[in-house]
Image: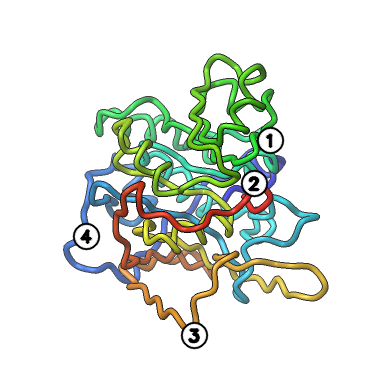
């Protein structure tokens, strides 16, 4: 997940190539441009449709440092260039990037494009998208139940799909820039995440990257929608004391009543960092497969 915007305004050192430790035979492979394949340690591809998420976590499982650090990925990753390269590569592979309103508010200058997070590979990211016959940038999709969005955010100025409730749409209608598309998806206080995913796919988006926080990812796991997880394991200890420091999933309890297992399908290394890829036993529920959603405060 993206760290504070200050992490991306300073010059980004070039990443060192990842060392491939393990890869499951038969994975989907796209032919990456040579420079990207050299840095990643091989090719990368996805079955279609596919919804995949990306996180960086400390060794003790922390992905968010608490409410006083709303966007803490760079502190956990140590601003490791290889982690930022992988973030950029996953965005370059995506038709759409899904985030919650909280992620947008926490990063007031961020743009969810490949080159924003790792500019050194901008030309190669663009070449990959050309080879895949994709738009110049993935479409940004922002999920907000209440419509509490900073309308002047640069990511909204360049265009985004906003999924909200009828009440949220009423709040946003007069404030969003004309580059945005507003979708009102019901009169209730919450949103159906399967319905949001159905709409994204109906726009022709087969590969969707989630850079949402732990609550929205809990929704994706809870509904069985999430297909793959990319996890950077950073060689740092975050610790826990008086503040809430979430792991990958928040707002959803699994064990001991619900046993979810995942399969490790790829492992790479750069120094003491591990770059892990997992397959979840996901399904593709329809919009009618609903469970109680979370409120805007959760996202």
Mark 1: secondary structure: loop
**What is the distance, in whole Å, between disc 2 and disc 1 at their CAs?**
8 Å
The answer to whether mark 3 and mark 1 are in CB contact below 8 A is no
- Say whether disc 4 or disc 2 marks the residue closer to the N-terminus: 4
For mark 4, does the 10 Å Cα neighbourhood hold few (<14), some (14 to 19), or many (20 or more) residues?
A: some
| Nearest the eye: 206 or 137 | 206
The quadrant where residue 106 appears: top right
**Residue occupying the point 70% across, 71% down:** 238
- Disc 3 marks which residue? 256
Where is mark 1, residue-wise? 148
Query: Alpha carbon of mark 2 to alpha carbon of mark 3: how far?
Result: 28 Å
| Mark 3, secondary structure of its residue | loop
Is tag 4's residue or tag 1's residue first in the polypeptide sequence?
4
Say whether marks 2 and 1 touch (CB < 8 Å).
yes
Of all residues, the one furthest to the left in this rendering is: 26
The residue singled out by tag 4 in the image is 27
Closer to viewer: mark 4 or mark 3? 3
User: How many other residues sit within 10 Å of disc 1, few (<14), some (14-19) or many (≥20)?
Assistant: some
Residue 205, given in percent of the width and then of the height, sits at: 32, 36
- Residue 219: x and y, percent? 49, 58
Instruction: Identify the residue shown where x is 62% and y is 76%.
Output: 60
Q: Residue extending furthest front?
A: 187
Distance from Cα at disc 4 to Cα at disc 3: 31 Å
């Amino acid at each position: 997940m993206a760290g504070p915007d200050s992490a991306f305004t300073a010059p980004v050192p070039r990443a060192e190539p990842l060392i491939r430790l393990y890869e499951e035979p038969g994975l989907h492979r796209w032919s990456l441009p040579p420079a990207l394949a050299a840095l990643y340690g091989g090719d990368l591809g996805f079955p279609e449709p596919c919804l995949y998420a990306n996180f960086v976590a400390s060794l003790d499982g922390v992905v968010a440092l608490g409410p006083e650090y709303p966007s803490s990925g760079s502190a956990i990753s140590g601003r490791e260039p290889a982690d930022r390269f992988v973030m950029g590569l996953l965005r370059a592979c995506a038709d759409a990037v899904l985030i919650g309103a909280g992620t947008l508010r926490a990063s007031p200058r961020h743009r969810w494009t490949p080159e924003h997070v790792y500019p050194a590979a901008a030309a190669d990211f663009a070449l990959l998208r050309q080879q895949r016959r994709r738009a110049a940038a993935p479409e940004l999709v922002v999920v907000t139940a209440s419509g509490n969005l900073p309308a002047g955010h640069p990511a909204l100025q360049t265009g985004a799909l906003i999924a909200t409730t009828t009440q949220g749409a009423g709040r946003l209608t007069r404030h969003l820039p004309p580059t945005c598309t507003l979708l009102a998806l019901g009169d209730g206080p919450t949103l159906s995440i399967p319905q949001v995913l159905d709409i994204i796919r109906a726009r022709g988006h087969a590969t969707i990257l989630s850079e949402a926080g732990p609550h929205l990812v809990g929704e994706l796991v809870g509904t069985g929608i999430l297909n793959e997880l990319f996890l950077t394991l950073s060689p740092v200890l975050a610790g826990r004391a008086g503040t809430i420091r979430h792991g990958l999933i928040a707002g959803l309890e699994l064990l001991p009543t619900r046993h979810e297992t995942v399969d490790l399908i790829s492992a790479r290394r750069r120094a003491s960092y591990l770059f892990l890829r997992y397959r979840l036993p996901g399904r593709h529920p329809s919009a009618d497969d609903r469970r109680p959603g979370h409120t805007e405060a959760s996202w």
